[in-house]
Image (spheres, rainbow, N blue to C red):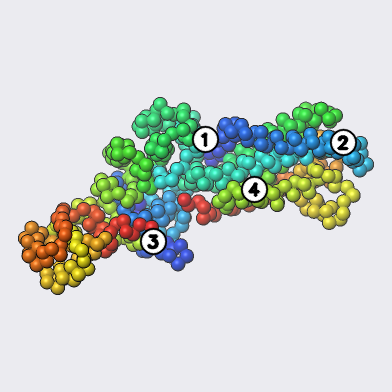
Amino acid sequence: MSGLRGAYALVERELVRFFRQPNRVAGAIGQPLIFWLLFGAAFRSSFRMPGGEESYAQFFLPGVAVLITLFTAIFSTISIIEDRNQGFLQGVLVAPIGRGWMVLGKIVGGTVLAVLQAGIFLLLAPTVGIALSPLQFLEAIGVLGLVAFGLCGLGFCIAWRMDSTQGFHAIMSVFLMPMWLMSGSFFPSEGLHPVLGWMLKLNPLTYGVTGLRHALGMTGSPSSAVCVGVTALFAVLMFVFALRLASRPAKGDLR
Amino acid sequence: MNAIEVAAVVHRYGERRALDDVSFDVRSGEIFGLLGPNGGGKTTLFRILTTLMAPTGGAARVLGHDCVQDARAVRAKLGVVFQSPSLDPKLRVRENLWYHGALYGLHGRDVRARTADRLARVGLTERALDKVEDLSGGLRRRVELAKGMLHDPDVMILDEPSTGLDPGARRDLWEYLGSLRERDGVTSLVTTHLMEEAERCDRLAILDEGRLVALGTPDELRARIGGAIVTLGAPDSEALQRALLDRFKIPSTLVDDTLRFEHEDAQALLPKLFAAFGAKITTVSVGRPTLEDVFIQATGHKFWSADA
């Protein structure tokens, strides 16, 4: 399986690059962590979970894990633009490795980094009173992996044709961040205006966040099976789109 | 079998024809030069041959495999050295080669041994652990070369490989291409805009404005120009050009304010020119034809003036 080996090399490269740029570690974990501490403290007395006893720090925890995943996915797929501009990508494109393996290598690389960072963050759960059994932790990691794979695939599709990282930042502000805000991660999905309610229902990330809530032993609807199913479907779809994009020559392949 | 076949290749970018019905073959084991000014179509052809782009018309084949239909087979046989960098600057030199090898299905002890061997051949053994971003431009080019030949390709395609190399490294590069051919029978196609490099090729194709204007060995191409090349400088070169045609029936090319023409017997001609025009001529030079003269004769303009 020479394709698998090539994909694995791309994953390994992703990890090596990541750990050589420590500011990336700080960037992906730092901001979500600060959000969690700040909002957790700020909403401590005013927040009341509909029909539950959850504190805001507890409620917000899965959302922050997904935010870390989102940031990592963004950072690692934005590097496609750098790879293109710095020329590394052209060397990959003239190599005999199949495009599917190439896409898989890039997406799995980002997924591993995301799960690693979000997983470390989840270890903080007991500090706010969410008891985690090892099995629950593994389940949560599994859900995060699916979410990360889908988000990295989405990031791949956005980044593939882009020639500047500024363009990606713009999309992050107007599309990816709102997508996260409207996923039941920042405010509960119960009792919302119907329009907002529908936006949450149509947002694939909602199912990732809710799936993670289930894994952590928190309440949520729809059911765990539906959440995992939708999240997995989203991941597969994003991979297929990314593969289709990467199989057609892009103008920027040539430089 | 021919290593590379370019058959009636046409490529358009919108309205502009970057390649206009270009055909030639590169024989197995040749060092073949693709010479031409920037914007002449070299880079377009490079992209087509390396499977990065499909031509609008015609076909390109590497070792019999079509560059569009059979791109995977072409990619496996081809070693590519890009003009622009294709290394990951954050990775060490040897890591770049390892990961590159993995994309070609190489792994384990094999890829490590190959990496060590190629780095030794380009004189970079001591820099194997350096990050690419810490290397000078010339050293990075050498890593690119080592990378291009890591998987023992049958055909190497190099786009302006001597860009950024000092004269010593440039000489090493050409010796290296020669040794690849002698030892392993590797075919090389090299794009260049340097005449001195073109001289070192077995055969040359000259591309200008997307057309193939000359094809042959450097000696054959020079032999197309019979005698010597005469260059005349004059304050009013256009008037001199007309006079030369009227009185001596010699057509000449006006290039950068100097007149150029070829002549069988320049030594006998020069005194007559001075007798006829005297002070109207300010400078004279007579020389053996160079590849640049071939280019000028084939295209009617100076090599550099077509520079984009």
Q: Secondary structure at mark 2?
A: loop
Determine if marks 4 and 3 fall on one subunit.
Answer: no
Q: Secondary structure at mark 1?
A: loop
Which residue is rendered at x = 81% and y = 45% of the image? A184
Residue picked out by circle 3: B19
Q: Position of residue A79 (x, y in %)?
A: 58, 43
Q: Secondary structure at mark 3?
A: strand
The local crowd at label 1, few if under 14, some if 14 to 19, many if 20 or more residues have their Cα within 10 Å, is: some
What amino acid does circle 4 point to? His
Which residue is rendered at x = 57% and y = 45% of the image? A80
Q: Is residue A24 visible?
A: yes
Determine if marks 2 and 3 fall on one subunit.
Answer: no
Q: Are marks 3 and 1 in contact (CB under 8 Å)?
A: no
Residue picked out by circle 2: A44
Residue picked out by circle 4: A169
The numbered mark at residue A92 is: none
Q: Distance between the Cα atoms at labels 2 and 3?
A: 69 Å
Which residue is rendered at x = 44% and y = 29% of the image? B128
Q: Is residue A15 visible?
A: no
The chain letter under disc 3 is: B
- Of A107 and B246, nearer the camera is B246
- Of B8 and A43, nearer the camera is A43
